[in-house]
Amino acid sequence: MAGLPDYVVDADAVLKDADAKWRHGRAPDYSRTRQIWAETKRSNHAAGSLPDLVEKLVKNWEIEASYKTDLADWRTIDTSNYSFSVNGGPAQSGEHMLQVGTYNAIIEPNEYYCPFHSTFDASHKTFKRMMPTFAWEVLEVYSGPPQVSFRWRHWGIMNDDYVGFNDKGEKVSIKAHGGPIDVEGVGVAVVNDKLQLTKVEVFFDPMTMFRQMAAKGNVVKEPVAAE
């Protein structure tokens, strides 16, 4: 669509940034996640509609936040003004997310997982091994630019066991049940005239995911011996 940046019209636009510094030396492969999204999404937005543009912007932002290691390469944000917060908590910078990772930036310490006991790489291995595809969609958009309010859904299948560390430092194992993990929440994003994100606020119950993971009761918690 003429006049609109590629990251709001193509969900994979930033994957084509050949000169970007990628976390594992190359752009990731999202083809399987996109396939699952197409097969199991609940919403069908008309191309070029506001929900469609918002969905693609957030998908490109997630790619950059997860895999681009230099903030200067993030095209979806206004780097000089960008901030991110969860459930009304303190605003985080892009640099913070680069250091801790998207999972650690979003999940608060709890009985199943603690971001302070997991690095960026370890957190991604933990959740991506358990759930190889974690598709995302916009369900509804309530207001348009410059402040965009929307409801979203994040979902996948628990194909492998979960192993992580909780807020007590215990090793937590949850046996895979092969069933769905389905999380919904609300986002409020402020964008500039280039439709870049300047402020992102996310509201959701992160325990929803863990409760669904542990639904069959296959949870083991083990103290970790001090070194």
Image (spheres, rainbow, N blue to C red):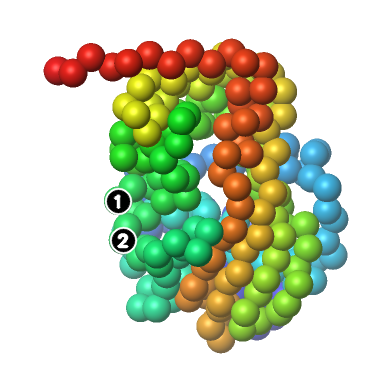
**Image label count:** 2
As drawn, is 136 to the left or to the right of 195? right
Alpha carbon separation for disc pair 2 and 1? 6 Å
Residue at point 80%, 39% (across, down): 40
Label 1, secondary structure: give it: helix
Residue 67 visible to an observer of this rendering: no
Residue kind at label 1, given as amino acid type: Gln
* Residue 183 drawn at (x, y percent): 67, 43
- Residue drawn at the location 50% of the way across and 52% of the way down: 63
- The foreground one among 153 and 217 is 217
Measured along the vertical axis of the image, is residue 58 above or below residue 225? Answer: below
Q: Which mark is residue 62?
A: none
Give the residue at mark 2: 95
Q: Nearer the viewer, residue 199 or 192?
A: 199
Horizontal and vertical percent position of residue 163: 45, 21
Identified at 72% across, 29% down, the residue is 180
**Pick the front one: 82 or 7:** 82
Image point 61% across, 83% down: which residue?
A: 146
Quarter of image, res 223:
top left
Q: Is disc 2 in contact with disc 1, using a CB cutoff of under 8 Å?
A: yes
Residue occupied by mark 1: 99
Q: Is residue 178 above or below residue 95?
A: above
Position above or below: 175 against 54: above
Label 2 crowd bin: few (<14), some (14–19), many (20+), radius 10 Å: some
In the rendered image, residue 157, in percent from the top left (x then y), is placed at: 67, 28
Q: Nearer the viewer, residue 104 or 120?
A: 104
Q: Quadrant of the N terminus?
A: bottom right
Judge left or right: residue 123 versus residue 181: left
